[in-house]
Amino acid sequence: LGADGWLHHERESWVRICGVWVPYPFQYNLHRLPKEQQLECVNGLLTLHSNGTHAYTNFEDLIHRVFGVGVAKLFMLPYNYKVWAYPPSDLATGWIGERVAVPDLKKIMESVIFNQDNVSWGPNNTFRFPKHGGTGAIWRSVADHLPAEKIHYQRRIKEIDADAKVVRGDDGTESPYDALITTMPVDLLARMLKLEGLKRECDRLKFSTVHIIGVGLKGQPSDEIAKKCWMYFPEDNSPFYRVTVFSNYSPNNVPDINRYWSLMAEISQSPKKEVNTERLIEDTIQGMINTGLIESRDQVHHTWQQSIERGYPTPSLERDKALKTILPTLEKMGIYSRGRFGAWKYEVSNQDHSFMQGVEVIQHI
């Protein structure tokens, strides 16, 4: 995008809970909570019996043994159900890595006693964002460096003939290949290849749907919201688990930054967490009022909605075992399944991870 194509931001991520704003990570900023909840969380941490080497049976088990009963009850369990759309007991633990700040009791007690924020943890405490065109501008710019005749949009794949090594499109085109790199969801790939053994393994993979609600707002955000980047919402007074102040990422994300601002909310859904999709916009606006993001419906200029059926690949208890069969079987056929749902690994499914999966598979081939 060039030197002038980016805006640089310092992350301001927060948790809205108990009627107050707590900086992220929640467990390092307990001093912001009301005293009763502070005590509950600290007591839970002080009575922990884990030494950190326990073989956790699932994510809920880890939460209780690492964060204590107070942090678990107040934040970790309700938030993780809200974001994953599956109970934490259905999730494995191998995906965590940098994604979860494991508490350091000494730091937590310092924060509580000295009433100090601790906000610098995490892999993205600073980040940059395109001035124009949103995140898609990055990849459109990358595509501009490639030969235009090699890129074909809106062509649906009808069949992959793994024996003949040919991909057939629904427009009648046939593309032969030596090695095939695909980012389509691996469960759909298995169906297309008509491999019953793989299909059975893929049926064990879980995912959640994400509904994205954009709310364009008149005026200016309150001083409380004005500098925030994104916020987490564990409580049941709102349907969303996260809201981004999207106009803060770039002033060009709204028509006139002096007259408008915008919020982007995310709501998860799965067979274990149903959502009333017909009420999503109304429930989102009410949730924004309930959590203090906006004051009234009169501020709403317009709304926008998109539902992404496959939003997150779930790090379920069965996932790793299934992938150990699925991916090597495909590679023996010269088919390399990569990307967010091609490899089905949440912990390496961000844009940068997915891009590097492409680089690495080319080097491997």
Image: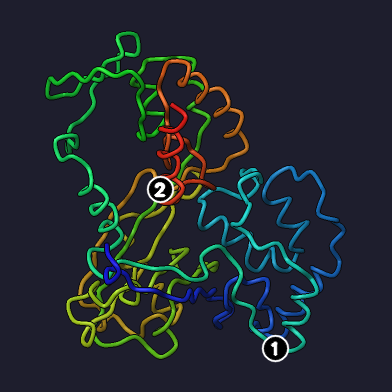
253 left or right of 230 in image: left
The image position of residue 240, as x and y in percent, is 43, 64
The coloring applied to the image is: rainbow
Q: Residue at point 23% right, 52% down?
A: 140
Of badges 1 and 2, the one in the foreground is 1
135 left or right of 53 in image: left
Q: Secondary structure at mark 1?
A: loop
Q: Quadrant of the C terminus?
A: top left
The image position of residue 166, as x and y in percent, is 26, 16
In three-dimensional space, the C-alpha distance between marks 1 and 2, rounded to whole angstroms, equals 38 Å
Write down the quadrant of residue 257 in the picture: bottom left
Q: Quadrant of the N terminus?
A: bottom left
Q: Is residue 104 above or below residue 135?
A: below
Q: Residue at point 44% right, 88% down?
A: 224
Q: Is residue 270 visible?
A: no
Q: Is residue 326 above or below residue 259?
A: above
**In this view of the protein, which residue sits in the foreground, 126 or 33?**
126
The image position of residue 29, as x and y in percent, is 65, 78
**In this view of the protein, which residue sits in the foreground, 228 or 39?**
228
Q: Residue at point 70% right, 67% down?
A: 71
Mark 2 closeness class: few <14, some 14–19, many ≥20 residues within 10 Å: some
Q: Secondary structure at mark 2?
A: strand
Amino acid on which disc 2 is placed:
Gly
**In this view of the protein, which residue sits in the foreground, 164 or 142?**
142
Label of residue 311 in the image: 2
Amino acid on which disc 1 is placed:
Asn
Q: Which residue is mark 1?
A: 115
Q: Residue at point 14% right, 35% down?
A: 149
Q: Is residue 84 visible?
A: yes
The image position of residue 313, as x and y in percent, is 48, 43
Write down the quadrant of residue 129 in the picture: bottom left
88 left or right of 112 in image: left
